[in-house]
Structure formats: C-alpha cells, structure tokens
Image (cartoon, rainbow, N blue to C red):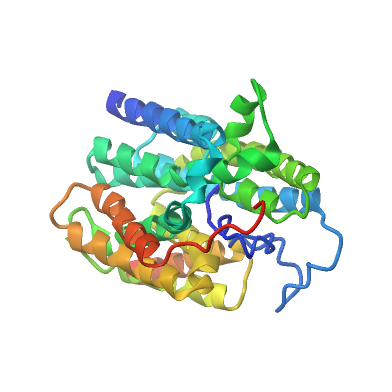
Amino acid sequence: MPEDSAASGDQEPAAPSPGSGPARATPGRNSSRGRGPAPVRDGIGLGLAVGLSGLAFGAAAVSSGLSTWQACALSIFAFTGASQFALASVVATGGSLIAGTAGAILLGSRNTLYGLRLADLLSVRGPRKLIVAQGVIDECTAIALAQPDPPAARAGFRATFACLYLTWNLCTLAGALGAGRLGSPQAYGLDVVGPAAFLALIWPRLRAGRTERSVAVGGVVIALAATPFLPTGVPVILAAFAALAGALADPAAPLRGPA
Amino acid sequence: MTGVWIAVAVTAAGCYALKLAGLTVPQRVLDNPRVRRFAELVPVALLAALIAVQVATSGQSITIDPDRMAGLGAAVVALLLRAPFLAVIVAAAGTAALLHAAGVS
C-alpha cells in the first residue's frame, strides 16, 4: 500500500525501507551507507512488496461494500493507500460519507508536505509536473530522499513510482475480483491488514523519538475519546491536533544548508 | 451507491490536488520549523488514530475485538523482530484469521 512515513526527517533519510522492509537486506544493522546506492533496485523492490498489498486493499474494499470499479478508481486516481483504506473502512461501518471523505483527504495531506520537499530535488516543471504529482507518496518520497544526489533521487523516484503504480493497481483489481469468492474478510484476517500496515509504516517514526511516541499516543487517545460522540471518520481528523501540539512543543531544528 | 461514487471521486480529486499542491507551493513554507515538524508528525498522529479506531471501535462504541488485538500484537512482535513489511502484514492477518477460525468452531 502506498503509505508510510519516514520520508520526513532531514537527518535520517538513509533507511531505504520506510517501514516496509524489502530493502532492509542486511540483518540487524544498517550497513547500506558505504556501498553504492541502487535507487532503481530499491525502488522496484519496495514497489513490488508494497504494491502486493493492493490485493488486500482490493479485497477489503469490496468486502466493505465498494464495487470493483470503485476500488480500482481509488487506486488509479487517489493512489495513496491510507486514504483508500480509510474511505473503505468508513463505507464498511456505514459511517458518514462526508466525514469519511474528509478524513481520507486529510490523510492525504502529508503528501503535500512531501511535495514541498521533493519539488526542488526532482526539479519538475511544465506538464510533467501533472504526472509526477501522482507519485508524491510515502514510498517514492522515502526512496528519493535516501539517495545521495538529485539524479539518483530522480531515478529512484521514477522506479518506485512506476513499479508501485503498476503493481498496486493490478493487485487492487485482482483482490477486488477475488474478494467475492473469499467470503468473510474476518476469516482471512483482512480486517487487521489496514491497522498492521499503518503500524508498520509509522514504526520507524515511533522509534525516532519521544515526541513521535507522544503524538501517536495522543492521536489514539483523541480518536478513542471522540468516537462515542462524533460520526465515524471525524475522530481521526481530530487526531491531527496531537501533531499540532507536538510541532508546537518540539519544532524541527533549523535547516542547515540545502536539504 | 451514487453517494459512494461521489465519495470516491472527491477523495481521488482531493488526494491528487494535495499532491500537486506540494510541488507547486513556494518552498519558503518549509522554512518555518513548526510547519516542518507538523508535516513530519501528521502521519504519525493520523495513522495511530486509524489503528485505534479500526481495532478498538465498532461504529460509535469502544469494543475490544480479541482477534484484531491479537493480530495487531503479532504485527508488533514482527516489527520488533525487524520483519519486512509484507511479513508484518501476513503475521497480523494470519493470527487474526486463526483466532477467528478457532472462535467460530
């Protein structure tokens, strides 16, 4: 699924696997630093591994009550996994579609912030920007930021985007078509695929510092406390206040030179 | 069904617009350390909230679903063992599915 974080820190863009693990080849330690970068290889590996989770999205979406074409439309046009899973889960629980849509879009807002980081690095102008924009998601950003120079960053971005986009969309279709034959999503544990994927995606952030962990706990508390009182989807939006509090209490270090 | 299509279309358009906006907005915005920190922390807060909502609520009530909790627990174990992304997913789904099957029978 095209989602995760780890694409944000200035100091530690190195880990090529933002919570998804395929590039974490060396067990135990991160020893990739000294060797030559392989942006295309890492991008394709990450794209394949994460793209396969499109099966889970397709199946979960159809089990939630979306049609096959609705699931595919989300993967083709929204192409950002957390938002897609979020909308599907609101449809599944019969929650407010307006709140669900707002929550899904808000979840996509971090891609704006990735775009801010990437604009300079990828130096896209003109009509190409319209295509590149669709690739501004967690995985592509993480791979691009992990590269030592702009050409490698562009190569990594392109490889990740192309591979992930193809795999994610084909797997969404396959998962959606297969879901009818699968029966209850619970029988396959599909109802925990979303949460497990989200956890894997924020895991590197949680290890990064105390503020991150506090913000995560804050988000959980806000969402659970608001759940009984607000329509489905809204509590998740409110969790953004935990991020706001964390940002005010612990701002980022000033930029040192070109990021 | 029409409502769902509208939600799909608006979500898709909104998500795309947000991506494009980032490539277009002046870089100066990120000069503010608080804005940059907020950008880093938003996914942490929202995804943590989503995890909690999907595992521990049903509609508007707080309900602990043992299968899902166990699945999430398996994911934590897999992550602590530095398992790759897909292995984390498989561990979580497999655990929840096994418990579901055991509970049904």
Residue plotted at (47% across, 56% down):
B33
Task: Report whether B83 appears left or right of B65.
Answer: right
The x and y percentages for residue B85 are 60, 62
Indicate the position of residue A241 as horizontal and vertical percent values: 29, 56
Query: A190 and A39: which one is in front?
Result: A39
Instruction: Give the tally of numbered discs.
Output: 0
Seen as rendered, the residue at the extreme left is A229
Outermost residue, right side = A36
- Decide if residue A237 is in sight here: yes
Towards the viewer: A174 or A76: A76
Q: Is residue B48 above or below residue A2?
A: below
Residue A29 coordinates in the image, percent (x, y): 72, 77
Q: Which residue does the image show at 44% across and 68% down from the upper left?
A: A212
Residue reaching furthest to the top: A127
- Is residue A49 visible to the viewer in this orientation of the structure? no
Q: Is residue A45 left or right of residue A134?
A: right
Place residue A126 in its image quadrant.
Answer: top right
Question: What residue is at 66 percent from the left and 25 percent from the top?
Answer: A128
Task: Please tell me whether residue B18 is drawn above or below residue A145 in the rendered image.
Answer: above
Q: Can you give x and y, in whole percent of width and height, for residue B72 in the image? A: 43, 69
Q: Is residue A139 above or below residue A192?
A: above
In the image, taking residue A45 as reference, residue A235 lies left or right, namely left
